[in-house]
Image (spheres, coloured by chain):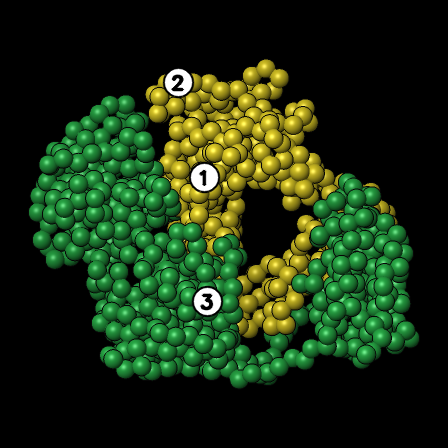
Chain colours: A yellow, B green
């Protein structure tokens, strides 16, 4: 992020929305809305004086709404560009003209309540899609009790809890009683490899749960984990060694079997019912916390974006590409990389990003208009 | 010798640093350190005011070493170096101490310990600053040519992608012809693309590309130089020649383990996947009953890694046989079925639908193969199976090429514990080596599908062309964004 942020040839347009793309002069004409931050990006240095004084509390989306932020906020600590944004849905001044304390405490005078969303246009030779992923909402899987049983959470919620900058300062505290969870069960393929939801393998969840379980043990020496899985698909570089290390050194118990149901036991403890397919016995296990390893999907706007650009997407919204030309979309001059094409992990995404950059730069360096090469 | 005069600037970074440790105490401590003649605490050292302050202090106090204790050099080192330069101090006499990411942010609950650590970090920074010597930047010409080592799908893809950027490429192949491992295959999963057709189209494209010069039957004997100016010596047809180039890409691939001594392998009734591909390609496959055994020689003590592709190659071929001869009996014995992603899972489902039978076995109770019969304990079904069959196909892992060791020494780039090439960062720099100007792609790095190898190859071509194009990147203009009203 920092590299991209300070690269002299990269112009970052954060907090912006692509509205329309048309083919013009052999390239693309892109119309963008730059949303009003109500803070001058060129002046603000993210000192945080405004945040310290802002009286309005708002659910913190970055922390999966597990805690609160203020109406003026930095989306997350290391975000680029490092400038504050005022949330117009909550800010008292923007809603009813009262307060304005942020403007008063800002010594640099960066707050600008008069700022408006602005249109901007770009003429470019190539477009790269890197719209990433969103995670599956496990609420429809009622048998897992997500949203009803307090100590059943998703993998992303776990990530925020175990993170030092998260709502609990890195302590794996239960939602029900704020006590440390020692026994944690991970339910793989929540929504993945499931004909009713995502009929594919999300590819990253097996490793992700192992990593989470290992982190748990690093934070808490008494931590014991159970990973309920079918095939354990740890195929990347050194992944098998990692899995073995998790099992031998970090107290991870791998249980082969899909969890049938999660019930609520005493003291808000979730109880998992499952068949251990290796012993072929139906068993139950009570734990302090359950983490659902949810499927990953393309971002919710992926299909609409595909429509706007004339790029073929599949029924989930994944950009369709060919094995022999994996960075090229169905639309000439438009390339894609990362999870928007299908499940992949970080190194794969990074390699794909360079691949898309290669294809896009071939086009731009050639100077030839799209369709005339 | 010039008297050393160190100036130390302690940044509060708003509350980012000052909120979690005592910057005043750190500044006071800094002033007691040897050769420190000036100390200042700033709210934001990186701000306009902070920079001016540094420049003024340099002039007024005749500072010749500058230490800023603030955030990360990744963001602001260029800023502070420029400030030194502006005030007449060589920019390399500047030392950055990170008391934010390395201290205040990670010790948010430990005021005293955090303050002590910041003092230690500043003391180390000052000690280093006193030893710094002025440096000058040098400029060197860049040879606008790449050498690609290995002429399989990855190498050819890299070569073509670099050539499309109007750069010259020497593609070096050890064998007599291009094509590599994929050239020996019948079809490619998941789409079922004809492997031979795909490879010959690539070979034709390489031959037709005048910017790519191919050296077959060639081995590398020496590598010298540095980014922008490498010299690669190779022996080809009893002649030795050297190629000057600016960047090198390693695409030497891997090959499937020959399963000698594994599960009754005899090359006739018990064969490897690659041998099956050969039989399928030439239409010489006979029999009506087949058993595929995955993880043959993989995920064990000798080869502890999962080779990523063998399950899919087995599933692809099992499906192909079953669909071609519907009354054939096809079993796949597996430990975990690695059908990750969108298409692979679909292929697995189709194989199950058309009647390929899948039986999982445990690592501790592997199948046995005897004269036309495979015996296995199905660990999920909880019973033993005796499967008579015409042919057993062993899915063995890809293993690193024997030449990798020698090449890694010549290039001075490392191999990992499994003897695959080791990239600069396993997550964030997957196709770079830590040596500048040398890159890696495909199965030389780690087993992967054709799609993954092509992605990495295009990626490596992109990375390699950055230094190659650097020499012509003058006068590049910034994008300008037209703001509407």
In the rendered image, residue B252, in percent from the top left (x then y), is placed at 34, 64
- Which mark sits nearer the N-terminus, 2 or 1? 1
- 3D distance between C-alphas at marks 3 and 2: 55 Å
Residue identified by numbered label 3: B412
Q: Residue at x 22, y 57 (%)?
A: B185
Residue pointed to by mark 2: A282
Residue topped by disc 1 = A243
Mark 1 residue element: helix
Q: Residues at badges 3 and 2 in contact (C-beta under 8 Å)?
A: no
Q: Quadrant of residue A283?
A: top left
Name the foreground residue: B392 vs B455.
B392
Closer to viewer: mark 3 or mark 2:
3
Report if residue A259 is visible in the image: yes
Position of residue A185 in the picture relative to residue A111 (left or right): left
Residue B163 x/y as whole percent: 39, 77
| Residue at the spot 68% in from the left edge and 80% down from the top edge | B136
Camera-side mark, 2 or 1: 1
| Disc 2 to disc 1, C-alpha distance | 25 Å
């Amino acid at each position: 992020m920092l590299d991209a942020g300070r690269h002299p040839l990269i112009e970052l347009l954060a907090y912006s929305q692509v509205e329309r793309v048309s083919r013009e002069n052999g390239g693309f004409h892109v119309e963008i809305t730059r949303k009003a931050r109500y803070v001058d990006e060129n002046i603000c240095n993210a000192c945080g004086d405004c945040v310290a004084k802002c009286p309005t509390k708002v659910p913190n989306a970055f922390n999966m709404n597990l805690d609160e932020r203020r109406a003026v906020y930095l989306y997350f600590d290391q975000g680029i560009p490092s400038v504050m944004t005022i949330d117009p849905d909550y800010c008292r001044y923007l809603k009813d003209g009262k307060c304005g304390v942020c403007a008063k405490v800002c010594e640099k005078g960066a707050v600008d309540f008069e700022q408006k969303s602005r249109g901007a246009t770009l003429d470019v030779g190539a477009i790269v899609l890197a719209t990433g992923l969103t995670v599956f909402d496990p609420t429809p899987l009622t048998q897992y009790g997500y949203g009803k049983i307090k100590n059943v959470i998703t993998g992303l919620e776990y990530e925020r809890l175990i993170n030092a900058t998260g709502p609990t300062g890195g302590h794996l505290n239960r939602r029900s009683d704020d006590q440390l969870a020692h026994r944690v069960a991970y339910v793989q393929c929540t929504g993945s490899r499931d004909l009713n939801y995502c009929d594919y393998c999300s590819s990253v969840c097996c490793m992700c749960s192992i990593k989470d379980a290992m982190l748990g043990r690093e934070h808490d020496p008494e931590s014991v984990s159970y990973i309920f899985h079918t095939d354990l698909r740890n195929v990347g570089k050194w992944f098998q060694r990692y899995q073995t290390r998790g099992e031998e050194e970090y107290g991870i118990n791998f249980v082969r079997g899909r969890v049938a149901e999660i019930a609520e036991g005493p003291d808000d403890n979730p109880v998992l019912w499952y068949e251990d397919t290796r012993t072929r016995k139906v068993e139950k296990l009570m734990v302090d916390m359950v983490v659902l390893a949810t499927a990953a999907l393309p971002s919710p706007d992926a299909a609409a974006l595909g429509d706007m650009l004339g790029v073929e997407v599949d029924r989930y919204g994944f950009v369709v590409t060919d094995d022999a030309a994996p960075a090229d979309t169905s639309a000439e001059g438009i390339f894609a990389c990362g999870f928007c094409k299908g499940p992949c992990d970080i190194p794969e995404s990074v390699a794909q990003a360079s691949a898309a950059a290669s294809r896009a730069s071939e086009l731009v360096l050639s100077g030839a208009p799209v369709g005339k090469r | 010798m010039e008297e050393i005069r160190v100036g130390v600037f302690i940044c509060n970074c708003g509350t980012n640093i000052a909120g979690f440790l005592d910057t005043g105490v750190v500044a006071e401590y800094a002033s007691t350190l040897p050769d420190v003649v000036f100390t200042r605490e700033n709210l934001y050292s990186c701000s306009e005011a902070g920079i001016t302050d540094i420049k003024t202090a340099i002039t007024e106090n005749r500072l010749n070493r500058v230490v800023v204790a603030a955030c990360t050099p990744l963001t602001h080192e260029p800023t502070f170096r420029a400030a030194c330069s502006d005030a007449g101090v060589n920019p390399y006499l500047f030392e950055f101490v990170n008391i934010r990411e390395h201290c205040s942010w990670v010790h948010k609950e430990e005021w005293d310990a955090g303050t002590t650590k910041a003092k230690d970090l500043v003391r180390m920074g000052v000690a280093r600053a006193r030893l710094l010597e002025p440096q000058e930047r040098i400029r060197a010409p860049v040879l606008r040519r790449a050498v690609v080592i290995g002429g399989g799908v990855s190498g050819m893809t890299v070569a073509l992608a670099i050539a499309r950027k109007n750069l010259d490429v020497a593609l070096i192949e050890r064998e007599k012809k291009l094509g590599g491992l994929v050239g020996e295959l019948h079809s490619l999963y998941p789409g079922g693309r004809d492997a031979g057709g795909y490879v010959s189209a690539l070979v034709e494209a390489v031959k037709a590309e005048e910017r790519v010069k191919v050296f077959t039957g060639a081995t590398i004997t020496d590598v010298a130089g540095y980014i922008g100016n490498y010299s690669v010596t190779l022996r080809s047809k009893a002649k030795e020649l050297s190629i000057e180039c600016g960047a090198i890409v390693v695409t030497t691939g891997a090959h499937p383990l020959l399963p000698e001594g594994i599960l009754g392998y005899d090359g006739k009734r018990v064969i490897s996947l690659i041998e099956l591909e050969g039989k399928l390609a030439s239409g010489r496959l006979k029999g009506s009953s087949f058993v595929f055994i995955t993880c043959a020689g993989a995920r064990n003590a000798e080869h502890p890694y999962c080779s990523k592709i063998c399950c899919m190659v087995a599933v692809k071929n099992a499906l192909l046989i079953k669909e071609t001869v519907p009354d054939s009996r096809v079993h796949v014995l597996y430990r975990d079925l690695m059908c990750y992603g969108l298409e692979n899972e679909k292929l697995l489902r189709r194989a199950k639908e058309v009647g390929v039978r899948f039986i999982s076995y445990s690592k501790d109770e592997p199948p046995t193969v005897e004269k036309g019969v495979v015996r296995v304990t199905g660990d999920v079904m909880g019973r033993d199976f005796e499967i008579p069959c015409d042919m057993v196909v062993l899915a063995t892992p890809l293993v690193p090429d024997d030449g990798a060791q020698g090449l890694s020494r010549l290039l001075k780039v490392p191999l990992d514990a499994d003897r695959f090439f080791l990239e600069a960062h396993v997550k964030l720099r997957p196709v770079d080596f830590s040596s500048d100007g040398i890159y890696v792609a495909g199965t030389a790095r780690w087993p992967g599908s054709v799609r993954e190898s092509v992605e990495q190859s295009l990626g490596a071509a992109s990375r390699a062309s950055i230094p190659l194009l650097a020499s012509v990147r003058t006068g590049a203009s910034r994008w300008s964004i037209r703001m509407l009203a």
